Amino acid sequence: MDVKIETASREDFVEMIQLADMTLPDRMNLHELKKYFELFPELIFKATFDNRLIGFSCAGIDMYQLTGWLLFSNVIKEFQGHGIGKKLIEARLRVLRQFSTLRKVLVTVSETNTSSIRALESFGFKLAHVEWDYYGPNKHRNIMELSIVPNRPPVMQESVLTVGSRFIS
């Protein structure tokens, strides 16, 4: 399946909201999506197949640029289970890692969304904590975390040569 992942644009608004109404009813509106475009224009991605929007996602970063967030992700039902969600995770992580001060990425996921939990775990996310009753009585959310090592050029100290019985770094 030839799915294309690319940065979304404001021209994608209407189609994205229509998709959100199908996949995330009552969870996103045009005003909210516009805010994400104002705050994080390079962190919103779309997935297309044959020029048809089949999913989209957004990342964010805190004002100190220490913590990134995978804010939301959705894929229409007929395309779920084909790795598109993982491609959207990968795209957001690739861009977030460009922030040299970033130390961790957090994501909120429903405790019942096992497919998303497994996808996030495949990238190294671990359960950080549970927020009880977040979505209402007995509807909890998991906060998962991925620690980030800032992108740095390789350091010579990482390779150690042995000469005789001495170590040279």
Image: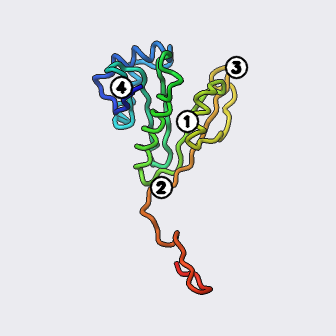
**Amino acid type, mark 2:** Pro
Q: Could you say whether the residue bearing mark 3 is in a helix, strand or loop?
A: loop
Q: In the image, residue 38 lies at what x, y percent?
A: 34, 32
Q: Are marks 2 and 3 in contact (CB under 8 Å)?
A: no
* Position of residue 107 measured from the top left corner of the image (x, y, whole percent): 55, 36
Give amino acid for label 1.
Val
Query: In whole angstroms, how far apart are the C-alphas of marks 1 and 4?
Result: 21 Å
Q: Amino acid at mark 3?
A: Pro
Number of the label disc, if any, that sits on residue 147: none
Mark 1 vs 2: CB contact within 8 A = no
Q: For residue 137, which numbered disc appears in the image? A: 3
Seen from the viewer's position, the closer of residues 98 and 65 is 98
Query: Which of the two discs, 2 and 4, labels the residue nearer the N terminus?
Result: 4
* Number of residues whose C-alpha sits closer than 10 Å to that of mark 3, classed few (under 14), some (14–19) or many (20 or more): few
Find out whether the residues at labels 2 and 4 contact each other: C-beta distance under 8 Å: no
Which of pointers 1 and 2 lies earlier in the amino acid sequence? 1
Between disc 1 and disc 4, the foreground one is: 1
Mark 1 or mark 4: whose residue is earlier in sequence: 4
Residue 107: mark? 1
Q: CA distance from mark 2 to mark 3?
A: 39 Å
Measure the alpha-carbon separation of dots 1 and 2: 19 Å
What residue is disc 4 on? 34
**Is label 2 or label 4 in front?**
2
| SS label for mark 2 | loop
Rendering coords of residue 24 (x, y %): 50, 17
Nearer the observer, 168 or 117: 168
Q: Nearer the viewer, residue 110 or 39?
A: 110
Residue at image coords 29%, 25%: 10
CA separation in Å, label 3 and label 1: 21 Å
Residue 1 picture quarter: top left
Amino acid type indicated by mark 4:
Lys
